Image (cartoon, coloured by chain):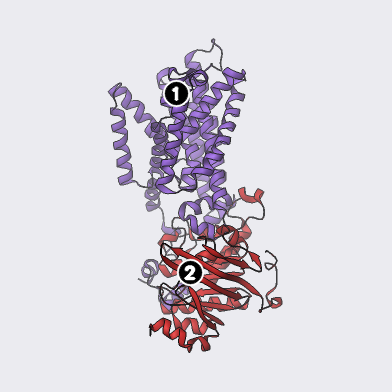
Chain colours: A purple, B red
Amino acid sequence: MPSASDRTRGPGLTTLLRLAGLLVLAAAVLSFPSVAANPFILSVGVVIMSYAVLATGWNFVGGFTGYMSLGHAAYSGLGGYATALLIIESGLNPWLALCLGALLTALIAVPVGIASLRVRGASFVIVSIAFVLILQLVFQSWGEFTGGSNGLRVPRPFGPDVLRPEQHERFFYLHAAVLAIALLAWWLIDRSRFGIGLKAIREDEDKAQALGIPTFTYKLVAFVVSAFFTAIGGGLYALWFGYLDPIFQFSILIGSYMVLMSLLGGIRSLYGPLLGALVVGYSVEFFKNEYGDTQFHLVATGLLLGLVVLFMPDGVIPALAALLRRFRPQASSIREVTQAELAEQRESQESGPITQGAKR
Amino acid sequence: MTSTHEQPAEQRESARIGLAATGLSKAFGGVRAVDDATVSFHHGKVNALIGPNGSGKTTFFNCVTGMIKPDSGTVTYDGADITGKAAHRIARAGIGRSFQLCRIFPRMTVLENVLAAVRPPSRTRLLASAHHRDDVARARELLSRVGIEHLERADARDLSYGQQKLLELAGVLMADPDTIMLDEPAGGVNPALIERIAGLVRSLNAEGKTFIVVEHNMELVMSLSDHVVVFDRGRRISEGPPSVVQNDPRVLEAYLGV
């Protein structure tokens, strides 16, 4: 892996640590169904995995380009409804319907992206919310096709002989597989030329364009990929949960959860959204359980977000990484310069913070 | 448009016109920032664009590099019309630029800042590692050329302002433009660094790069440039070799407001 060996001088210690971390993570995820105490805990696990897929899907556009879509429920909802309707109306195999539904959603994301990625910052956020609200109204009103406010029952992909705990377990592993693919795709983009272009857009879009990066195309591709993975997450959820209601599928709340989870974990980290989903997903289920059918879980979740933004603005993972770095030898310090370089710096008499430090 | 890329320095025709603007205008509300400006810049030279504050130099830069669309007029590069084209297309045609208040990617490392300017050979290579061996080698070469190679793993935002200016220049060079437009390269940096930047401009020019430099430091302009264009109120009022422009009464009038 050239990227790792270029960055570190040691014999790939970081790579080894990363691999070990990945193995532990995979083992923890795969063993969860067998250690889960009861079907309820297992179902919470499925919900958290579903959130993790959605948040990781969101992070293709949010993390790389910095465009904060609050309306990503549009794509999870479309993915869910497309999957369900393809099964109901065309009698497709559920898994084929899931893939086709996600592709259709990605196709819809193309014109939406072309329209909404023209504006930046707060304007983009508002456009993304507008789209999800339009979809909510359409899916509520178009009753004969979508089931309207009565909801839509999604045929179960597994036969009636598969019992509920078995269902949960299968869907847990399915979500884990999709999550693994999404994480792999994110990692591939992160280390690629395309990824560095996307990150340049996040940092300074005009500057990126002035360097020759076709910013609009880059953003659009990231947006469509993001919609695809979010739709897969939504479709898988629909197959598991078995019921869709426009109020919940196309809610700003679901989109906000994706943003909250990613921000909490760290949008610039591969596992950020996953960690965020774990914390937020568990908290939401916990609060719902504690406070019953009230809206208090929203208040608690809001408080959580407030705390994170105050104390870990970059997310949990970067905060932890910074903490770890403090215990390491300062081998990678930017102050590490040779005598010759020091002399040269003195010569040029720079007054920046780094050279000041080096002079002392 | 890409024909000039492979041309060796010694074969270039210094009389050839690169960037040219004809009747270029851009107004912001009632202010005519650039007003019917007609200018052309020859290849192989260090051109300076000077003028009092608010004379439209930066707006001119932004219009020709596609950052903003001009209201009227045409911009050509090597004879091809680039008026109102997207900024990345103009960049890919061979024009690189720096920004007045130095713009870098703050939360990326110094090395990544330079690598971001790599132009992939084909679309399929977009998913190849950004830290491709050849690219990294070239990026390091450029970083050492501007003198900040020891900082390659630092976050760009941790650099001093002067170092950030050098980093921005390295990034521009990574895209390998024929024409480099610098907006106030000496603004806000100390005299030693100004000398270093001037040295870089000279050596790059000797290798065949064309420069168009907006600058207020007259000493630097006069010592560095082959050709000086003077702007006032959005249009060209004078041009010529530094010694001629320096004594042009119109220029003195514009600067001193006599």
Location of the C terminus of chain A (image quadrant): bottom left
Same chain? Circles 2 and 1:
no
Of residues B155 and A64, the one nearer the viewer is: A64
Q: Quadrant of residue B85?
A: bottom right
Expressed as whole percent of the image width and height from the top left, the position of residue A85 reads: 55, 21
Q: Nearer the viewer, mark 2 or mark 1?
A: 2
The answer to whether A260 appears left or right of B46 in the picture is left
State if disc 1 and disc 2 touch (CB < 8 Å): no
What subunit carries mark 1?
A
Which residue is tagged 2? B34
Q: Secondary structure at mark 1?
A: helix
Q: Please tell me which residue lies in front, A38 or A58.
A: A58
Give the quadrant of residue B132: bottom right
Residue at (37, 29) in percent of width and height: A282
View extreme (front): residue? B30
Q: Position of residue A349 (x, y in %)?
A: 40, 76
Number of numbered discs overlaid on the protein picture: 2
> What amino acid does circle 1 point to?
Gln
Q: Amino acid at mark 2?
A: Val
Please say whether residue A184 is visible from this viewpoint. Answer: no
**Residue A310 visible, this angle:** yes
Image coords of residue A13 (percent x, y): 51, 49
Looking at the image, residue A76 sits to the left or right of residue B3; the answer is: left
Residue B105 placement (x, y as % from top left): 47, 58
- Residue on which the image places disc 1: A140
For the residues labelled 2 and 1, the Cα–Cα distance comes to 53 Å
In this rendering, the answer to whether A292 lies above or below A113 is above
